[in-house]
């Protein structure tokens, strides 16, 4: 495991220890927490972390019993929501042993351990593909080399397989204030690069995938008011300073990053985008003459 991967694993282990589980359990009915954010439902349903699951599969044609990779699966919430709907065999990978353990326990509780598998791996590692679909929801932003990560995932797609990326992508030409806030967000959330949309598109193209869809989902995010966010961030930063003297400020860092990201999104400096790409299918066999 690389030094950056170890930092991410420690980060999530600390958050798991101190995060309030009550609200997450109310959403999922279990200890399996959806880490990605709630979105407003364009069809009028309630805001929920599962809205993205429907949106990201629009236009994606999966075979019967698909093989699906969740690259950065967290506690497995996406697999637990979608497997009963689309079927298939799922592999969820995360750098966090704590998340793997919780996800496996939940799969066993739901009698899905033969369909849902969870492993402690990086999305830069060799993977047991090929997959008909690879999804990465708010996870590739942690990549140290996004182009390499995309290329690795593309390698493990079957012909005709899809790659779906959902992530926060900075806009070009940021103001000095936005640049400073972006740097703070990246530091707090352990995001070494945080590429703009153009860089993700270029990485997808370089990996030999065809971009088949893109959507800006920023307007669906539930955002706070700027004044309240600034005040809350200031309080968190003061608290983080004192807790940091004891080495116990990771939860505050995560919250500072989240509030900073909201401010960037309110100002239009960071957009929440969905990009869908596909590996070209095998050409049809030519009949023998």
Image (cartoon, helix red, strand yellow):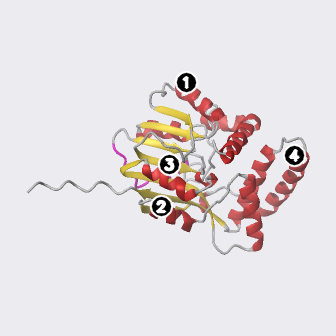
Where is residue 174 drawn, in percent x and y? 69, 72
The residue closer to the viewer here, 210 or 259, is: 210
Residue pictured at 68% horizontal, 40% vertical: 9
Left/right placement of residue 84 relative to residue 229 reads: left
Q: Which residue is mark 1?
A: 109
**Element marked by disc 4:** helix
Q: Residues within 10 Å of mark 4 (few under 14, many from 20)?
A: some
- What's the distance in space between the residues labelled 2 and 1, CA to CA? 37 Å
- What's the distance in space between the residues labelled 2 and 3, CA to CA? 14 Å
Q: Which mark is residue 204?
A: 2
Q: Nearer the viewer, mark 4 or mark 3?
A: 4
Sequence-first disc among 4 and 3: 3
Where is residue 257 drawn, in percent x and y? 74, 54
Q: Residues within 10 Å of mark 3 (few under 14, many from 20)?
A: many
**Element marked by disc 2:** helix
Quarter occupied by the N terminus? top right
The residue closer to the viewer here, 28 or 132, is: 132
The residue closer to the viewer here, 214 or 176, is: 176
Q: Nearer the viewer, mark 2 or mark 1?
A: 2
Q: Which residue is mark 3?
A: 135
Q: Which mark is residue 244?
A: 4
Which stretch did the figure color magenta?
Answer: 51-63
């Amino acid at each position: 495991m690389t030094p950056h991967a170890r930092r991410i694993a420690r980060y999530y282990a600390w958050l798991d220890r101190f995060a309030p589980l009550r609200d997450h359990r109310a959403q999922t009915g279990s200890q399996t927490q959806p880490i990605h954010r709630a979105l407003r439902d364009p069809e009028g349903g309630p805001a929920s972390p599962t809205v993205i699951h429907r949106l990201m599969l629009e236009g994606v044609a999966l075979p019967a019993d698909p093989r699906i990779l969740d690259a950065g699966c967290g506690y497995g919430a996406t697999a637990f929501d979608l497997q009963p709907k689309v079927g298939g065999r799922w592999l969820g990978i995360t750098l966090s042993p704590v998340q793997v353990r919780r996800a496996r326990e939940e799969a066993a509780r739901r009698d899905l351990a033969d369909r849902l598998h969870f492993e402690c791996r990086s999305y830069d590692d060799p993977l047991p593909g090929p997959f008909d679909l690879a999804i990465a929801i708010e996870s590739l932003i942690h990549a140290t080399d996004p182009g390499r990560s995309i290329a690795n995932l593309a390698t493990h797609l079957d012909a005709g397989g899809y790659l779906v990326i959902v992530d926060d992508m900075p806009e070009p030409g940021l103001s000095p204030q936005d640049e400073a806030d972006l740097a703070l967000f990246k530091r707090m959330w352990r995001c070494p690069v945080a590429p703009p949309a153009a860089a993700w598109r270029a990485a997808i193209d370089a990996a030999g995938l065809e971009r088949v869809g893109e959507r800006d989902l920023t307007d669906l995010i539930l955002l706070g008011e700027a004044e309240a966010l600034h005040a809350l961030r200031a309080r968190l930063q003061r608290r983080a300073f004192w807790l940091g003297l004891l080495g116990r400020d990771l939860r505050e860092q995560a919250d500072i990053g989240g509030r900073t990201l909201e401010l960037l999104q309110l100002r239009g400096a960071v957009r929440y985008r969905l990009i869908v790409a596909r590996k070209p299918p095998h050409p049809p066999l030519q009949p023998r003459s």
